Amino acid sequence: MKNQAAIFMTVCIVCFLFYCCTNATDTAVVTSDSASANNNMYAGYASQTEWGKHIATVTGCGDCHTPKKMTDRGPVDDSSLMFSGHPAQMPGPSLMPDQLAKGLAATNDLTAWIGPWGNSYAANITSDSTGIGSWSEEQFITCIRQGLYKGIAGSRPIMPPMPISSFRNMTDNELKALFSYLKTVKAVNNVVPEYRPPAGTPK
Ligand code: HEC
Protein backbone atom coordinates (compact mmCIF):
# COMPACT_ATOMS: atom_id res chain seq x y z
CA MET A 1 0.00 0.00 0.00
CA LYS A 2 2.80 2.36 1.02
CA ASN A 3 4.60 1.57 -2.23
CA GLN A 4 1.53 2.33 -4.36
CA ALA A 5 1.07 5.70 -2.65
CA ALA A 6 4.75 6.54 -3.28
CA ILE A 7 4.45 5.58 -6.99
CA PHE A 8 1.24 7.64 -7.31
CA MET A 9 2.93 10.67 -5.71
CA THR A 10 5.99 10.33 -7.98
CA VAL A 11 3.77 10.15 -11.09
CA CYS A 12 1.89 13.25 -9.92
CA ILE A 13 5.13 15.20 -9.35
CA VAL A 14 6.56 14.15 -12.74
CA CYS A 15 3.31 15.17 -14.47
CA PHE A 16 3.30 18.50 -12.65
CA LEU A 17 6.93 19.22 -13.56
CA PHE A 18 6.29 18.20 -17.18
CA TYR A 19 3.28 20.56 -17.32
CA CYS A 20 5.31 23.47 -15.90
CA CYS A 21 8.23 22.90 -18.28
CA THR A 22 6.12 22.65 -21.43
CA ASN A 23 4.16 25.71 -20.44
CA ALA A 24 7.31 27.68 -19.71
CA THR A 25 8.79 26.65 -23.08
CA ASP A 26 5.57 27.58 -24.87
CA THR A 27 5.59 31.06 -23.38
CA ALA A 28 9.24 31.55 -24.30
CA VAL A 29 8.59 30.43 -27.88
CA VAL A 30 5.59 32.75 -28.25
CA THR A 31 7.59 35.72 -26.94
CA SER A 32 10.59 35.14 -29.17
CA ASP A 33 8.28 34.54 -32.16
CA SER A 34 6.56 37.88 -31.77
CA ALA A 35 9.87 39.64 -31.13
CA SER A 36 11.33 38.23 -34.32
CA ALA A 37 8.14 39.06 -36.25
CA ASN A 38 8.59 42.70 -35.17
CA ASN A 39 12.27 42.61 -36.05
CA ASN A 40 11.41 41.29 -39.49
CA MET A 41 8.75 43.94 -39.94
CA TYR A 42 11.30 46.72 -39.32
CA ALA A 43 14.35 45.01 -40.87
CA GLY A 44 15.79 44.15 -37.45
CA TYR A 45 15.15 47.61 -35.91
CA ALA A 46 13.03 48.02 -32.78
CA SER A 47 10.53 50.38 -34.41
CA GLN A 48 9.47 51.81 -37.76
CA THR A 49 11.04 55.16 -36.83
CA GLU A 50 14.40 53.56 -35.91
CA TRP A 51 14.42 51.78 -39.26
CA GLY A 52 13.61 55.08 -41.04
CA LYS A 53 16.50 56.78 -39.24
CA HIS A 54 18.83 54.05 -40.49
CA ILE A 55 17.57 54.50 -44.09
CA ALA A 56 18.03 58.30 -43.91
CA THR A 57 21.58 57.78 -42.61
CA VAL A 58 22.77 55.23 -45.16
CA THR A 59 21.18 57.02 -48.13
CA GLY A 60 22.81 60.31 -47.08
CA CYS A 61 19.73 62.59 -47.09
CA GLY A 62 21.71 64.99 -44.90
CA ASP A 63 24.52 65.32 -47.46
CA CYS A 64 22.32 67.73 -49.37
CA HIS A 65 19.45 68.55 -46.98
CA THR A 66 21.51 69.51 -43.90
CA PRO A 67 23.42 72.83 -43.80
CA LYS A 68 27.08 72.33 -42.87
CA LYS A 69 29.69 73.90 -40.65
CA MET A 70 33.05 74.36 -42.32
CA THR A 71 36.02 72.66 -40.63
CA ASP A 72 39.66 72.34 -41.73
CA ARG A 73 38.75 68.85 -42.96
CA GLY A 74 35.81 70.05 -45.04
CA PRO A 75 32.09 70.54 -44.36
CA VAL A 76 30.33 68.62 -41.53
CA ASP A 77 26.58 68.47 -40.80
CA ASP A 78 25.26 71.25 -38.53
CA SER A 79 23.28 68.95 -36.20
CA SER A 80 21.11 71.83 -34.91
CA LEU A 81 19.77 72.30 -38.45
CA MET A 82 19.31 68.64 -39.47
CA PHE A 83 17.42 68.27 -42.80
CA SER A 84 16.28 71.91 -42.85
CA GLY A 85 17.39 72.49 -46.45
CA HIS A 86 19.19 75.40 -48.06
CA PRO A 87 19.16 78.26 -45.49
CA ALA A 88 16.80 81.02 -46.71
CA GLN A 89 19.33 83.81 -45.95
CA MET A 90 22.32 82.13 -47.66
CA PRO A 91 23.07 83.24 -51.23
CA GLY A 92 23.07 80.44 -53.83
CA PRO A 93 26.02 79.86 -56.15
CA SER A 94 26.27 82.18 -59.14
CA LEU A 95 27.85 81.53 -62.52
CA MET A 96 28.15 83.31 -65.84
CA PRO A 97 26.56 81.38 -68.78
CA ASP A 98 30.01 80.55 -70.29
CA GLN A 99 31.17 79.16 -66.92
CA LEU A 100 27.95 77.19 -66.61
CA ALA A 101 28.61 75.56 -70.00
CA LYS A 102 31.70 74.01 -68.40
CA GLY A 103 29.84 72.13 -65.69
CA LEU A 104 27.86 72.78 -62.53
CA ALA A 105 28.34 74.60 -59.25
CA ALA A 106 27.19 74.17 -55.67
CA THR A 107 27.46 76.15 -52.45
CA ASN A 108 30.19 74.78 -50.18
CA ASP A 109 27.55 73.20 -47.92
CA LEU A 110 26.03 71.38 -50.93
CA THR A 111 22.51 72.72 -50.28
CA ALA A 112 22.15 74.81 -53.48
CA TRP A 113 23.07 73.83 -57.01
CA ILE A 114 23.31 75.32 -60.49
CA GLY A 115 23.38 73.10 -63.57
CA PRO A 116 21.88 72.96 -67.05
CA TRP A 117 18.48 72.35 -65.32
CA GLY A 118 18.60 75.75 -63.53
CA ASN A 119 19.01 76.58 -59.81
CA SER A 120 17.81 74.00 -57.30
CA TYR A 121 17.79 74.26 -53.51
CA ALA A 122 17.70 71.27 -51.15
CA ALA A 123 14.23 71.23 -49.58
CA ASN A 124 13.37 71.55 -45.91
CA ILE A 125 12.35 68.00 -44.94
CA THR A 126 11.98 68.57 -41.17
CA SER A 127 8.64 68.20 -39.34
CA ASP A 128 8.07 71.99 -39.55
CA SER A 129 5.16 73.37 -41.60
CA THR A 130 7.79 74.93 -43.92
CA GLY A 131 9.10 71.36 -44.35
CA ILE A 132 7.05 68.17 -44.63
CA GLY A 133 5.13 68.69 -41.35
CA SER A 134 1.76 68.92 -43.08
CA TRP A 135 2.42 66.24 -45.73
CA SER A 136 0.51 62.96 -45.77
CA GLU A 137 2.35 59.66 -46.08
CA GLU A 138 0.75 59.21 -49.52
CA GLN A 139 2.12 62.59 -50.68
CA PHE A 140 5.63 61.59 -49.59
CA ILE A 141 5.42 58.27 -51.45
CA THR A 142 4.13 60.02 -54.62
CA CYS A 143 6.89 62.63 -54.35
CA ILE A 144 9.71 60.07 -54.24
CA ARG A 145 8.15 57.44 -56.56
CA GLN A 146 7.04 59.83 -59.28
CA GLY A 147 9.54 62.63 -58.67
CA LEU A 148 6.80 65.22 -58.24
CA TYR A 149 7.25 68.44 -56.23
CA LYS A 150 5.39 68.13 -52.90
CA GLY A 151 3.94 64.83 -54.13
CA ILE A 152 0.99 66.61 -55.74
CA ALA A 153 -0.36 65.23 -59.05
CA GLY A 154 0.40 67.66 -61.91
CA SER A 155 3.13 69.57 -60.05
CA ARG A 156 6.61 70.17 -61.53
CA PRO A 157 9.25 67.43 -61.63
CA ILE A 158 11.82 67.30 -58.82
CA MET A 159 15.15 68.55 -60.15
CA PRO A 160 18.72 67.24 -59.78
CA PRO A 161 20.69 66.48 -57.82
CA MET A 162 17.88 64.87 -55.76
CA PRO A 163 18.56 61.17 -56.53
CA ILE A 164 14.96 60.30 -57.49
CA SER A 165 16.07 57.64 -60.00
CA SER A 166 17.56 55.53 -57.20
CA PHE A 167 15.23 56.44 -54.31
CA ARG A 168 12.09 55.65 -56.32
CA ASN A 169 13.13 51.98 -56.00
CA MET A 170 12.54 51.96 -52.25
CA THR A 171 9.73 49.66 -51.18
CA ASP A 172 6.51 51.09 -49.74
CA ASN A 173 7.58 49.91 -46.29
CA GLU A 174 10.99 51.60 -46.61
CA LEU A 175 9.36 54.88 -47.71
CA LYS A 176 6.83 54.67 -44.86
CA ALA A 177 9.63 54.08 -42.33
CA LEU A 178 11.63 57.01 -43.76
CA PHE A 179 8.58 59.28 -43.60
CA SER A 180 7.76 58.23 -40.02
CA TYR A 181 11.34 59.13 -39.02
CA LEU A 182 11.34 62.52 -40.83
CA LYS A 183 8.13 63.39 -38.94
CA THR A 184 10.10 63.04 -35.69
CA VAL A 185 13.00 65.27 -36.79
CA LYS A 186 13.19 68.60 -34.89
CA ALA A 187 11.11 71.25 -36.70
CA VAL A 188 13.25 74.00 -38.25
CA ASN A 189 11.42 76.97 -39.75
CA ASN A 190 13.14 77.70 -43.08
CA VAL A 191 11.46 78.70 -46.32
CA VAL A 192 13.82 77.42 -49.01
CA PRO A 193 14.05 79.58 -52.18
CA GLU A 194 12.00 78.49 -55.18
CA TYR A 195 13.62 76.44 -57.94
CA ARG A 196 14.59 78.68 -60.90
CA PRO A 197 14.73 77.30 -64.46
CA PRO A 198 17.76 78.28 -66.62
CA ALA A 199 17.77 81.88 -67.87
CA GLY A 200 15.87 82.20 -71.17
CA THR A 201 13.58 79.20 -70.55
CA PRO A 202 10.03 80.01 -71.71
CA LYS A 203 7.64 80.14 -68.72
C1 HEC B 1 22.57 64.85 -53.86
C2 HEC B 1 21.72 65.74 -53.08
C3 HEC B 1 20.47 65.17 -52.43
C4 HEC B 1 20.33 64.03 -51.66
C5 HEC B 1 21.40 63.01 -51.30
C6 HEC B 1 18.95 63.99 -51.25
N1 HEC B 1 18.27 65.06 -51.73
FE1 HEC B 1 16.29 65.41 -51.51
N2 HEC B 1 16.44 67.07 -52.71
C7 HEC B 1 17.63 67.61 -53.19
C8 HEC B 1 17.35 68.84 -53.91
C9 HEC B 1 18.37 69.76 -54.56
C10 HEC B 1 15.96 69.01 -53.85
C11 HEC B 1 15.13 70.14 -54.49
C12 HEC B 1 14.79 69.76 -55.90
C13 HEC B 1 13.77 70.69 -56.53
O1 HEC B 1 13.46 71.76 -55.99
O2 HEC B 1 13.28 70.33 -57.58
C14 HEC B 1 15.43 67.88 -53.11
C15 HEC B 1 14.07 67.67 -52.88
C16 HEC B 1 13.56 66.70 -52.02
C17 HEC B 1 12.17 66.54 -51.69
C18 HEC B 1 11.00 67.31 -52.32
C19 HEC B 1 10.55 68.41 -51.45
C20 HEC B 1 9.34 69.13 -52.01
O3 HEC B 1 8.99 70.17 -51.41
O4 HEC B 1 8.75 68.67 -52.99
C21 HEC B 1 12.08 65.54 -50.76
C22 HEC B 1 10.81 65.03 -50.07
C23 HEC B 1 13.41 65.06 -50.52
N3 HEC B 1 14.29 65.78 -51.31
C24 HEC B 1 13.72 64.05 -49.63
C25 HEC B 1 14.99 63.46 -49.58
C26 HEC B 1 15.28 62.31 -48.77
C27 HEC B 1 14.27 61.63 -47.84
C28 HEC B 1 16.58 61.97 -49.01
C29 HEC B 1 17.33 60.77 -48.50
C30 HEC B 1 16.67 59.48 -48.69
C31 HEC B 1 17.12 62.96 -49.96
N4 HEC B 1 16.12 63.84 -50.27
C32 HEC B 1 18.43 62.98 -50.44
C33 HEC B 1 18.88 67.05 -53.05
C34 HEC B 1 19.17 65.84 -52.44
Image (cartoon, rainbow, N blue to C red):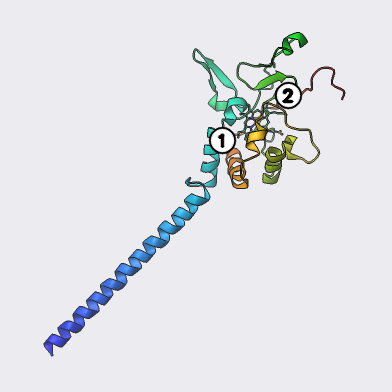
Q: Nearer the viewer, mark 2 or mark 1?
A: 1
Q: How many marks?
A: 2
The yes-or-no answer for disc 1 within 8 Å of ligand 1 is yes
Does 118 appear above or below 179? above
Image quarter of the N terminus: bottom left
Does 16 appear above or below 59? below
Residue 142 lies in quadrant: top right
Q: Which residue sits furthest bottom?
A: 1
Report if residue 135 is visible in the image: no
Report if residue 32 is visible in the image: yes
- Where is mark 2, residue-wise? 193
Residue 82 lies in quadrant: top right
Looking at the rendering, the quadrant in which ligand 1 lies is top right
Q: Amino acid at mark 1?
A: Ala
- Where is mark 1, residue-wise? 56
Query: Percent position (x, y) of residue 25?
Result: 34, 64
Which of the pair 171/92 is nearer the observer? 171
Image quarter of the C terminus: top right
Q: Which residue sits furthest right?
A: 202
Q: Amino acid at mark 2?
A: Pro
**Mark 2 touching mark 1, by CB under 8 A?**
no
Which of the pair 19/167 is nearer the observer? 167
Residue 167 lies in quadrant: top right
Tell me the crowding category of disc 1: few under 14, some 14 to 19, or many 20 or more residues within 10 angstroms, Cα based. Answer: some
